[in-house]
Image (cartoon, coloured by chain):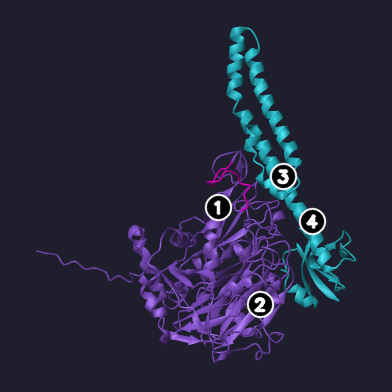
Amino acid sequence: MSFIVYNTKDNHAIGVYDTEQAAQNNVSVSDTTYIVVEYEWKETDYLVSMKLDADGVLSNKFPGKTIEEQKSLIEIEDAAKRLVEQVAFKTEKIKMDSADYINELKWKLTRARDNDLVNGNSDSMAEVLAEIDSIRSKSNAAEVALNALTTEEEVIAFDVKEQFN
Amino acid sequence: MARKLTTASVASQQKTINPYSQPCFTVYSLHHSHGGGYYQYDHNFNIVAADHGTGDSSGFGTWRTYTTSATEFFESSSSYNSTQTSSNASSNASWIVAHTPMVGYLGHMSHSSGGSGAGNMGGWTMSGRDNGPSYRSFGFRDVCPIVNETHQDYAIFSGAAANTEPVLMFLKRSATEYYNMRHNGRYSQQTVLPRQYEDRDGNAENYYSTYGGCCYNKKTNKFLVMYTTSSGRFKPVVYNNVPDLREFSHKNSKIYSESTSGQSDQNNNSSLYEYFHNSANITEYQQIETWTTYNNAGSMDEARYRPICFLCDNGDIVAFVQYNAGVNFWRWKGSDQTHDQRQTDGQLSQNGHYHHQMSWTTLYGYEQGRQFGSRWQVSSDGKFAWAYCASYYYGAGAYVMMVRISDGKLLRYQTNDSGDGRHPFPIGPSSMGWGNTANGDGGAGMRIGAIDLKYEMDKRDYGSDLGLDGVYMAYNFECGHYSTTYPCLIPAKYDTSLFCSEPHMPNVSEL
């Protein structure tokens, strides 16, 4: 029997120990994030593949796979996770940039209202609203373009500023 | 009639500073869309400085991205990895601040350290779209261990590796200064070393140089140079009766005003050139056999060109060598310099060649980027040192070798964490702090603790495990954000001599 130190907050295993005492030595008393789980360790188990379910049972999420196969699968998972993170960064930046550009046009709305009152039409306001709408359209298009990217490298290279030019 | 004035005698003109009240480390966080800040603690775990942001709106003190900028920093966006703490180490490459190799003797690669002269400044970014750490990483890769030194205000760099002569630079304890000196000028604080010595068969060999593979033992006045070959066959050479290298390192203060003339200095202009080229100063140790970490454990440049070495008082040399799936410890005995001692130490497990091995899974070194690979630190009193690296890919988990410099006694630790990096730091006179960059979600803050290496070395058997992950105190160290954030730790650069018997100022026992 082995004893696994497990991070319950981020859901990953940290170490395998032969005795419960050795495992407990690697867990601080006051921190409930880290727990020790008893587990029958198998030669084909890869620590990164070990996951705890809702019932507190630890198992290998890639049963039947060799260690090397598990590593490959984990790498694919990690790459996908990084892609999601990078897309989230860039999506947030697109939204913040578009909000910023729109805010920068507020003074034009005031001026357009005044112009339209003087001229008795709505031409100026329509012009500014079209400008704002263009920013929204570019923002939406940027998000679509970003989400179409499939690799981390492509997302990192994606220049948000260029999308609003 | 003149009056006679009497004056009271002055009790003491000496100003005293409690060494424990000096800065020790700073916790840093900045979730890319929430809050964060710098929180600095002293050697008693009391907070001494804080710069905290609430993470809303624009302007100073926000610690978040505002439209196109990270408002506090000279940075166009807080989504850069050297600035934000939204991502954990995991298998990420890049400049994640939580990576284990992000900290070392020179502090933190992405954030300048606070120190005794830094007022209430806990630290500050050196990022600039990840460029700052990319410049400073040269220093973290090249800096050589200094042991038994109570005045840890300088650094020695070995900045050439592979088939070339070693190049040493003796400078201040600053990764930024090293970058300046390395790239912007050639000054008299630089020298090259000879590299032709006997191989194991007694034949002359032109050895290769290493990044950071030297060690200065101030107490014994000896300087170790670890040579290597293309297959990683290490060969230690020890210089005796070394001039005071701290004094030499501080001689370069004139460079700031005379950099133009300094540009013309050559490697052989250094007064140390003659010393290092005098064979009478040298003791050769035995080269290792053909079984090497590079050849037989896992080949990558870190395994052959970047040993972290410690020269102990008894002449023992221990080296920490990282390969693509773990680490090896190597040892040479000072009492028998003609043999590497792979078969004579019974306490650590061996397989007949290397002294000890810890391994787990894929691990990368400096060949994947200067910011990766092994690091080292030393206790304030200089009597204990530790080398370490990640255990998972680029920066998660840790392998650690702890050394008692007086006799080379070793303790070890391995944590197979695929998620979070570890950040060690010196604390107190002889202790080692240990920080975990794990998720601070739920108000746990950064998990930090410390162990007294003097006590642990006395108490534990040679080569035994020391469960560093068991020391953490959660809910004690602010990390600026209640939800998901992966904080990092910035070791401070304080006056180490205040902890010791010959301080700049009176030591703690006189307070």
Q: Quadrant of the N terminus of chain B?
A: bottom left
Q: Label 4: few (<14), some or many (≥20) within 10 Å?
A: few
Q: Is residue A76 above or below residue B228?
A: above
The residue that appears at 80% across and 76% down in the rendered structure is A20
Q: Is residue B364 above or below residue A134?
A: below
Pinpoint the chain carrying mark 1.
B
- Which is closer to the viewer, label 4 or label 3? 4
Circle on res. B73: none
Q: Amino acid at mark 4?
A: Glu
Pinpoint the chain carrying mark 3.
A
Q: Which residue is mark 3?
A: A88
Q: Are the residues flagged by discs 1 and 4 from a single subunit? A: no
Q: Which residue is mark 2?
A: B293
Calculate the distance from the C-alpha at mark 3 to the C-alpha at mark 1: 23 Å
Circle on res. A77: 4
- Which is closer to the viewer, label 1 or label 2? 2
Furthest toward the left, the residue is B1
Chain coloured purple: B
Q: Are the residues flagged by discs 1 and 2 from a single subunit? A: yes
